[in-house]
């Protein structure tokens, strides 16, 4: 079988390139041994693009960080109390990350393209350029005025997560907690509801990953677009607050939306442990479960490359063919693999963006 291109629902590579301490100063254009994703390794792994997240980390002045907020419990863990960001700070940081993505596009001399239409992704898959969707992981990135959505849409934003795992003016994200239901707090605020309508009007994809369950149902009621969780897994196989219950999966199926399988081992393993020694078989079981529940046309990948610990057997983006081999062994034929690797994302994006 020819190498099948992979278009993917989530990476945090921009953050790793922007924060030198996190990314160790690596370049997107040189093959590195650190992190998960750069252009040479993308080519090796037939990674043809995906959602590039603008994630604004906690403001160091707020004195909160994930490691010190982590509490080990009898059954698992809990990371609590990630404070809301100052929207001015969030907007400034998001502007820098957005500028970085466009700078990469320019420096790539045609090898990478920030895409605004599904047809542009088709072209990239055809000619081998990397297709990047500008995605905001948290609507506080818009700044204090939600009306800024139109402005960033004009710039190229095509996907918006209402929240990361913290509250903001629009909604409440789930804390990282295991085991836990995703029902962890109140639903959307009035501003959040308004933002959903704006996303629908402008054709911006609404990402449900990180949103709590009440918020999820509010979006399901309000939105006229397919329901999409770009990087989440079935709660039935790994009961973290970040994963989706069967009821949520059924709503995604009924809206003809989709789920991107997250390779983060902590969201894959039934024990919730952050252990890279996790077999590819476990990823395949998540794919099987989702295909069974929502259908072969509504499952894709949402790797979380550069944002999470992934199974050793994938390692980084160049290891994607290993996963495809495992899925083949699980009985997926070429036509099905083409849906899982990129076809379904293209279908949902075409439906959501129009054209
Ligand atoms: Zn995330």
Image (tube, rainbow, N blue to C red):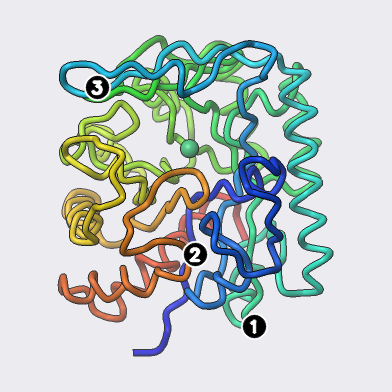
Q: For this view, does 330 lie left or right of residue 103?
A: left
CB-based contact (under 8 Å), mark 1 and mark 3:
no
**Which residue is more in the foreground, 73 or 260?**
73
Query: How far across and how far down the image is residue 173, in percent?
Result: 45, 21
Query: How far across and how far down the image is residue 156, in percent?
Result: 74, 49
**Which residue is more in the foreground, 19 or 165?**
19
Q: For this view, does 30 lie left or right of residue 43?
A: right
Q: Give above or below for 326 relative to 260.
A: below
Which label is found at residue 181? 3
Sequence-first disc among 1 and 2: 2
Which label is found at residue 127? 1
CB-based contact (under 8 Å), mark 2 and mark 3:
no
Q: Would you call the spot at circle 1 few (<14 residues within 10 Å), some (14-19), or many (20 or more)?
A: few
How many numbered marks appear? 3
User: Could you say whether the residue bearing mark 2 is in a helix, strand or loop?
Assistant: strand
Which label is found at residue 7? 2
What's the distance in space between the residues labelled 1 and 3, CA to CA?
Answer: 43 Å
Taking the spot 77% from the left edge, 59% from the top edge, the residue there is 104
Query: How far across and how far down the image is residue 6, in percent?
Result: 46, 69
Taking the spot 30% from the left edge, 81% from the top edge, the residue there is 334
| Mark 2 Cβ inside 8 Å of ligand 1 | no
Query: How far across and how far down the image is residue 105, in percent?
Result: 77, 62
What's the distance in space between the residues labelled 1 and 2, CA to CA?
Answer: 14 Å
What's the distance in space between the residues labelled 2 and 3, CA to CA?
Answer: 29 Å
């Amino acid at each position: 079988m020819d190498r099948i291109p992979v278009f993917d629902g989530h990476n945090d590579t921009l953050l790793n390139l922007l924060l030198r301490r996190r990314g160790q100063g690596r370049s997107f254009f040189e093959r590195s041994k650190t992190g998960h994703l750069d252009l040479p390794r993308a080519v090796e792994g037939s990674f043809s693009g995906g959602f590039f997240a603008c994630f604004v980390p906690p403001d160091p002045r707020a004195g909160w960080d994930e490691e010190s907020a982590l509490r080990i419990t009898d059954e698992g863990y809990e990371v609590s109390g990630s404070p809301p960001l100052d929207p001015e700070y969030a907007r400034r940081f998001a502007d820098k990350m957005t500028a970085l993505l466009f700078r990469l596009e320019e420096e790539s001399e045609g090898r990478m393209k920030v895409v605004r239409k599904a047809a542009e992704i088709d072209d990239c898959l055809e000619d081998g350029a990397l297709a990047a969707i500008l995605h905001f992981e948290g609507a506080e990135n818009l700044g204090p005025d939600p009306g800024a959505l139109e402005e960033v849409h004009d710039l190229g934003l095509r996907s918006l997560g209402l929240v990361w795992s913290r509250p903001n003016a629009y909604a409440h994200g789930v804390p990282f907690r295991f085991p836990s239901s995703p029902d962890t707090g109140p639903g959307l605020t009035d501003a959040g509801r308004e933002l959903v309508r704006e996303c629908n009007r402008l054709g911006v994809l609404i990402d449900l990953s990180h949103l709590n369950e009440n918020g999820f149902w509010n979006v399901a009621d309000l939105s006229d677009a397919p329901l999409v969780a770009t990087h989440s897994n079935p709660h039935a196989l790994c009961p973290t607050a970040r994963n989706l219950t069967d009821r949520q999966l059924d709503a995604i199926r009924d809206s003809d939306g989709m789920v991107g399988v997250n390779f983060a081992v902590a969201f894959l393993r039934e024990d919730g442990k952050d252990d890279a020694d996790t077999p590819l078989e476990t990823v395949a079981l998540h794919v099987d479960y989702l295909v069974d529940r929502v259908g072969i046309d509504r499952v894709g990948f949402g790797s979380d490359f550069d944002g999470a610990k992934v199974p050793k057997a994938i390692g980084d983006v160049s290891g994607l063919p290993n996963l495809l081999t495992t899925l083949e062994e699980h009985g997926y034929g070429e036509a099905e693999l083409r849906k899982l690797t990129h076809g379904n994302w293209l279908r949902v994006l075409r439906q959501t963006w129009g054209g």
